[in-house]
Image (spheres, rainbow, N blue to C red):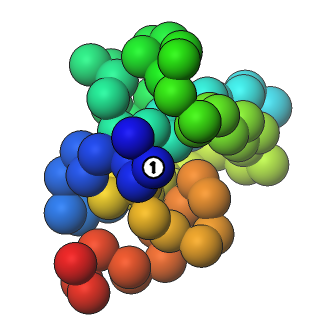
């Protein structure tokens, strides 16, 4: 597995809470998308921590191919 599994071809809008850390799934295998559940074990992928600077809605990448990990950069529109 050298490429992540595309979990979905659109971002996940998530309401985050200021000061809280979220662990984004980078492999695409998690059953708790867009967050990590440990499914990456045994793969070359490592989840990415995201610490919310303020309470707001952020858009986590669903296609797992963003260059702005863990946030969506629109890459899904080219898949």
- Judging depth in this view, the residue of 39 and 68 nearest the camera is 39
Q: Is residue 12 visible in the rendered structure shown here?
A: no
Instruction: Tell me the SS state at disc 1.
Output: loop
Of the 4 image quadrants, the one containing the N terminus is top left
Q: Is residue 19 left or right of residue 5?
A: right
Give the answer, above or below, for where 14 lies relative to 29: below
Furthest residue in direction front, as rendered = 1
At x 23% / y 63%, what residue is drawn? 10
Image coords of residue 3 (percent x, y): 40, 53
Give the answer, above or below, for where 56 lies relative to 11: above
Q: Is residue 30 left or right of residue 54?
A: left
- Judging depth in this view, the residue of 4 and 17 nearest the camera is 4
Name the residue carrying label 1.
Answer: 2
Binning the other alpha carbons within 10 Å of mark 1 as few (below 14), some (14 to 19) or many (20 upward) gives: few
Q: Is residue 56 visible in the rendered structure shown here?
A: yes
At x 32% / y 29%, what residue is drawn? 29
Give the answer, above or below, for where 36 lies relative to 15: above
Image coords of residue 79 (percent x, y): 22, 78
- Judging depth in this view, the residue of 40 and 36 nearest the camera is 40
Image coords of residue 13 (percent x, y): 35, 52
Q: Is residue 41 left or right of residue 14?
A: right
- Judging depth in this view, the residue of 60 and 27 nearest the camera is 27
Image coords of residue 51 (percent x, y): 76, 39
At x 29% / y 74%, what residue is drawn? 76
Give the answer, above or below, for where 49 lies relative to 12: above
Q: Is residue 19 left or right of residue 12?
A: right
> How many numbered marks appear?
1
At x 72% / y 28%, what residue is drawn? 21
Q: Quadrant of residue 11?
A: bottom left
């Amino acid at each position: 597995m050298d490429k992540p599994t595309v979990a979905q071809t659109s971002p996940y809008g998530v309401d985050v809470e200021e000061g809280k850390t979220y662990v984004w799934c980078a492999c695409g295998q998690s059953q708790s998308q867009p967050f990590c559940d440990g499914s990456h074990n045994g793969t070359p992928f490592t989840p990415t921590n995201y610490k919310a600077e303020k309470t707001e809605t952020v858009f986590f990448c669903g296609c797992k191919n963003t260059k702005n990990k863990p946030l969506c950069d629109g890459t899904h529109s080219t898949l």
